[in-house]
Image (tube, rainbow, N blue to C red):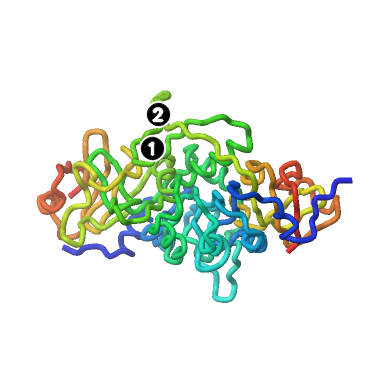
Amino acid sequence: MKKLDRKQIAARLARDIPEGAYVNLGIGLPTLVADFLPKGREIILHSENGILGLGPKPAPGEEDEDVMNAGKEPATLLTGGAYFHHADSFGMIRGRHLDFAVLGAFQVSVAGDLANWHTGGADDIPAVGGAMDLAVGAKKVLVMMEHLTKKGESKIVERCTYPLTGARCVDRIYTDLAVIDVKADGLHVVDMVEGLDFQELQRLTGVPLKRLATAA
Amino acid sequence: MINKFVASPAEALADVPNGATVMIHGFGNAGMPSALIDALIAQGARELTIVNNNAGNADSGLAALIAAKRVRKILCSFPRQSDSWHFDKAYRAGEIELELVPQGTLAERIRAAGAGIGAFFTPTAYGTRLAEGKETRRIGERDYVLEYPIHADYALIKADRADRWGNLTYRKSARNFGPIMAMAAKTTVVQVRETVELGELDPEHVVTPGIFVKRVVKH
């Protein structure tokens, strides 16, 4: 079996973002998706701090301290982009105007519960940012993560053991092993990496999976 | 004649009392009113409640205010960062209280205060530990959490240009919390890059109208 690396997961996910979509890419792994969006499509990226039409990193020396992404890294604005204040920015999120939010995760449950903001450690200083707003607000929530933890445990679980970011909010999961839809009747495998068969994916994942008619 | 221009950040913040609630604009360095924060540190007010998206970065601005032990409580969405060491230390020492608020809920609670809204139901954080103990309601097909406005005594804002009536324009993503914080505070103090004559700002481009602004300092 050929596991996908992080860039390949990003590229796989990017293929599914259609022309004209408004998309928020979460901090961390999801920001990689921007590099793989199909060139022929107009896709508009949203940034929580008040940008639609977020562009790529500026060339060295061209940074503007007043233009940054939600991770506080220097960014640019595409032609046709817009700036707006924070309440409008989160109105866009919460008001169901964004087509997709792409988020990282510690765990996703069979019911689509998402845990991605807090490890639950008593000594950890919690920080949430816009994760809870994106989880409930975007029309579709796409999760991008490695399938297994470093210890080999499935990050797709019956019930999240980490504190929740949102309940029943995840629509689709992209991992280094498979693409899985979260539906009312359970988890449906959309596709798997080359050389991985359904039984092996089922064994690694632990929770019950269904095969889509189109999946190998 | 209305003239909201004041000579210095020190003069603009001379009346901040101990125990005040102070909103501080900015997302990272974009929009952070550094001159006003420095003046607040020099002014000496203690036991402050601070509202900001973060809890200070590195050693200047809000981080310096925390390091100077002036902050009793902070409301923010994302305190923990690679360079939030002054907050981290104060928090672990039990010297500062944290109210963690999801970023959109933070923005909306600020907006609600400025708009005279008594409370609102939001779907954000339903079913999570940030909604524990809060009133919830099912409206239609969704579950919501009741949230209350955040009012402030002062808002410290950095804008781009202002006239003597306090009309403001912002620059790029440095707009972030400025327009809503300006509305939510009793006394809004603004640091601007440039002051201009009345009439020089295109009325179509004014983002914060002067009614929300008390004092303006060029810095």
Distance between mark 1 and mark 2 Cα atoms: 8 Å
Left or right of B33, for residue A156:
left
In percent of width and height, residue B144 lies at 42, 31
Question: Can the viewer see residue A19?
Answer: no
Task: List the single residue furthest toward the bottom.
Answer: A61
- Label 2 residue SS: strand
- Mark 2 Cα shell of 10 Å, populated few (<14), some (14-19), many (≥20): some
Establish if B14 lies above or below A88. Answer: below
In percent of width and height, residue A165 lies at 35, 44
Q: Residue at x 46, y 60 (%)?
A: B87
Question: Can the viewer see residue B192?
Answer: yes
Q: Name the residue under label 2.
A: B136
Determine the chain carrying the residue at label 1.
B
- Between residue B108 and residue A172, name the one nearer to us: B108
- Between residue B183 and residue A60, name the one nearer to us: B183
Counting every numbered tag in the picture gives: 2
Left or right of B217, for residue A91:
left
Choose top left, top right, bottom left or bottom right for residue A148.
Answer: bottom left
- Between residue B118 and residue B71, name the one nearer to us: B71
Callout 1 amino acid:
Ala
In percent of width and height, residue A17 lies at 40, 50
Q: Mark 1 points at which residue?
A: B131
Establish if B81 lies above or below B215. Answer: below
Q: Which residue is drawn at 43% across and 54% down?
A: A25
Task: List the single residue furthest toward the right.
Answer: B1
Q: Please give the label number shown on residue A117.
A: none
Say whether marks 1 and 2 touch (CB < 8 Å): yes
Determine the chain carrying the residue at label 2.
B
